[in-house]
């Protein structure tokens, strides 16, 4: 297992500059154009070093220094640990992990989950799971993925209508629901439960920190995307 972990760590480190570039591009407020080039020097930035600074003018772009790298490595190691006997399912996990890192940082930074990221996430996961079901000659697994995706998406869409979540959370739920559905209803429910628990714990910690600094607790908002992603990862690893 050690060589696999070493390979996963290397993959995470190699992917981090690319993921940083995607985070910098999409971590912009609603209504603003994508950040295709450095706002200061105009240099197109597709890869970013661990410092997160533009190679041309050294301006900080996207995520903070040395924050993406450990997350990318942890995601790669988690995929290696949860690797399925079917390669296409492992590829679906890897695809969700890579885009999930970007989505998590973008949502944490600007409170949005762009459709330019959630759409390819859903499309890639769906295509790979269809291939997995065909390889297994198991249409019931594909039906279960569809039903779980619709159920999770419907729950999150209801929360969007009630104003509790943003519009990007429901397509993310569709993708994660489809992926968790491959492992069964119990795993999907576990993923939602883990997301709620993790969000609750984080909210409690933030409230306690605000009270300790004598700051108002009201008005503290949490991005749902990172917790949905962490909940799904927790359920897959614990299955």
Image (cartoon, helix red, strand yellow):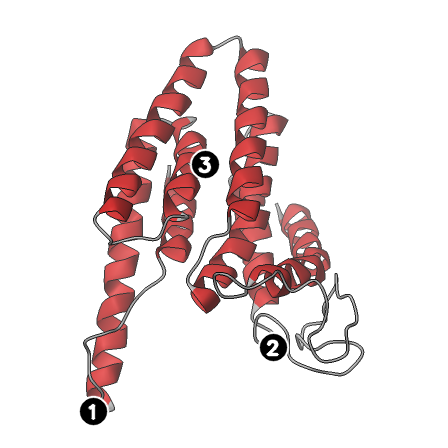
Q: Measured from the top left, where is residue 68 in percent x and y?
A: 58, 66
- Mark 3 and mark 1 lie on one chain; the one further toward the N terminus is 3
Q: Mark 3 points at which residue?
A: 175
Say which residue appears at 73% left-offset and 58% top-offset. Answer: 14
Q: Is mark 1 on a helix, strand or loop?
A: loop
Figure quadrant of residue 136: top right
Residue lying furthest bottom in this view? Answer: 214
- Mark 2 and mark 3 lie on one chain; the one further toward the N terminus is 2
Figure quadrant of residue 125: top right
Residues at marks 3 and 1, CA–CA distance in whole angstroms: 40 Å
Q: Mark 1 points at which residue?
A: 214
Work out which quarter of the rendered image holds the N terminus and state it.
Answer: top right
Say which residue appears at 25% left-offset and 64% top-offset. Answer: 201
- Mark 2 and mark 1 lie on one chain; the one further toward the N terminus is 2
Q: Name the residue under label 2.
A: 65
Q: Measured from the top left, where is residue 103 in percent x and y?
A: 51, 54
Q: Name the foreground residue: 187 vs 62.
A: 62
Q: Name the foreground residue: 174 vs 66.
A: 174
Q: Is mark 2 on a helix, strand or loop?
A: loop
Residues at marks 2 and 1, CA–CA distance in whole angstroms: 28 Å
**On the picture, is 202 further left or further right than 38?**
left
Figure quadrant of residue 41: bottom right
> Would residue 224 be visible to someone looking at this image?
yes
**On the picture, is 181 further left or further right than 77?**
left
- Relative to 161, residue 12 above or below: below
- Relative to 13, residue 208 above or below: below
Q: Name the foreground residue: 58 vs 125.
A: 58
Q: Measured from the top left, where is residue 189 in percent x and y?
A: 27, 36
């Amino acid at each position: 297992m050690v060589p696999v972990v070493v390979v996963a760590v290397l993959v995470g480190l190699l992917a981090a500059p690319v993921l940083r570039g995607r985070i910098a591009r999409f971590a912009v407020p609603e209504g603003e154009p994508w950040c295709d080039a450095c706002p200061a020097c105009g240099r197109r930035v597709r890869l970013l070093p661990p410092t997160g600074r533009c190679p041309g003018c050294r301006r900080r772009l996207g995520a903070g220094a040395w924050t993406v790298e450990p997350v990318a490595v942890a995601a790669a190691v988690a995929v290696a640990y949860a690797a399925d006997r079917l390669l296409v399912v492992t590829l679906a996990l890897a695809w969700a992990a890579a885009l999930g890192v970007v989505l998590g940082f973008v949502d944490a930074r600007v409170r949005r989950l762009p459709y330019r990221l959630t759409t390819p996430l859903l499309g890639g996961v769906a295509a790979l799971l269809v291939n997995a079901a065909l390889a297994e000659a198991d249409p019931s697994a594909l039906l279960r993925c569809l039903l779980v995706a619709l159920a999770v998406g419907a729950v999150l869409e209801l929360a969007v209508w009630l104003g509790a979540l943003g519009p990007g959370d429901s397509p993310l739920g569709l993708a994660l629901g489809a992926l968790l559905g491959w492992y069964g209803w119990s795993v999907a429910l576990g993923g939602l439960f883990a997301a709620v628990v993790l969000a609750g714990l984080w909210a409690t910690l933030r409230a306690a920190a605000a009270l300790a600094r004598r700051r108002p607790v009201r008005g503290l908002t949490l991005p749902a995307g990172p917790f949905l992603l962490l909940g799904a990862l927790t359920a897959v690893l614990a299955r």
